[in-house]
Image (cartoon, rainbow, N blue to C red):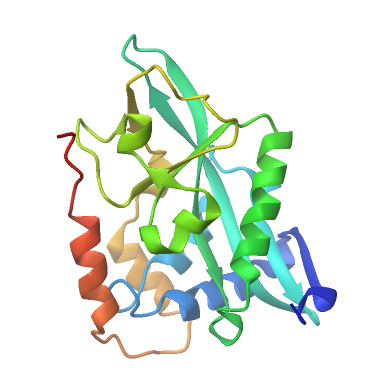
Amino acid sequence: MNLNKNIIIRNETPADYRAVEKMTREAFWNLYMPGCVEHYLAHILRSASDFIPELDLVVEKDNRIIGNVMYTKAKLIDETGREKTILTFGPVCVDPDFQRQGLSKLLLEKSFTIAKQLNYDAIVIFGMPSNYVSRGFESCLKHHVSLNGTYPTAMLVKELVPGVLKEHQWLYQESPAMNVDMAKVDTFDQTFKPKAKEWQPSQEEFEIISHSTISEN
C-alpha cells in the first residue's frame, strides 16, 4: 500500500482530542442514524475507569489524524458466576478521505498485538459482520457468548488466545462507560460546525442487523 511509508500509528495524546472527535464525527455522520453519537462517546470514554489508554491509538499521516480506535474493559460471566475481564472497542474509524485503503486493518492489527502484550485474551464487539469477519471476528453463538440469553447477529467475538472461551457458556456485560446520554450528545454536537441530519440506506441496514438474533437451532 502506497500509504504505508507515510503512516504512523501511535497513542493518542491530549493535543489530538479535538481532531479525533472531529474526524470521528465526519466518519459516522448519518451512517447508522441521522447525525451520530460516536464523537461524543470518544469524548467521554477517556475519563472512564474502564478506558485503556494503551489501546487508544491514532493513525497519523503528514501530521494529520486520519484514524482512531479506543478500547474499554468489558466482562464475560460463565455458568458458575466467574467473571472474566475482556476487551471491547469503539469507536473505531478512518477519515472518510482515506477509507478503503487498508488503514483500519493496520490499526486493528496493531491494537490486537498490543492487547496480547497486555495479557488480554478476548474481544467482544457490536458491529456489522461484513466489516469484521475478515479481522478474525466470529459469531457470538460460535463461542457461546450471549447477551441476556440471546445471540445478537451484531455481537462478534475474537479470541486473541485460541480456545480461551471454549467449554463454557458466557454472558456478556458491557462497561457502563458505553452508555450515552442523548441530550448531552446534542449539547456537545453544538460545539462543532453544523451538519444536516439525514436518512440514508445504511441506517436501515444497521437497524435490521442490530435488532436481529441468531438461533441456537
As displayed, is residue 93 above or below residue 46? below
What x and y, as percent, mark residue 66? Answer: 65, 76
Rendered-image quadrant of the C terminus:
top left
User: What residue sits 80% from the left and 68% below the top?
Assistant: 8
What x and y, as percent, mark residue 193? Answer: 47, 89
As displayed, is residue 49 above or below residue 208? above
What x and y, as percent, mark residue 46? Answer: 58, 51
Q: Most extreme residue toward the top, as rendered?
A: 80
The answer to whether 56 appears left or right of 154 in the picture is right
**Total numbered badges shown on the rendered structure:** 0
- On the question of residue 55 being in view, the answer is yes
| Among the 4 quarters of the image, the one containing residue 141 | top left
User: What residue sits 38% from the left and 57% below the top?
Assistant: 127
- On the question of residue 47 being in view, the answer is no
The answer to whether 38 appears left or right of 30 in the picture is right
Q: Most extreme residue toward the front, as rendered?
A: 217
As displayed, is residue 118 above or below residue 64? above
User: What residue sits 43% from the left and 18% below the top?
Assistant: 83
What x and y, as percent, mark residue 80? Answer: 34, 9
| Among the 4 quarters of the image, the one containing residue 109 | bottom right
User: What residue sits 71% from the left and 60% below the top?
Assistant: 12
Rendered-image quadrant of the N terminus:
bottom right
| Among the 4 quarters of the image, the one containing residue 198 | bottom left
Viewer-proximal residue, 187 or 152? 152
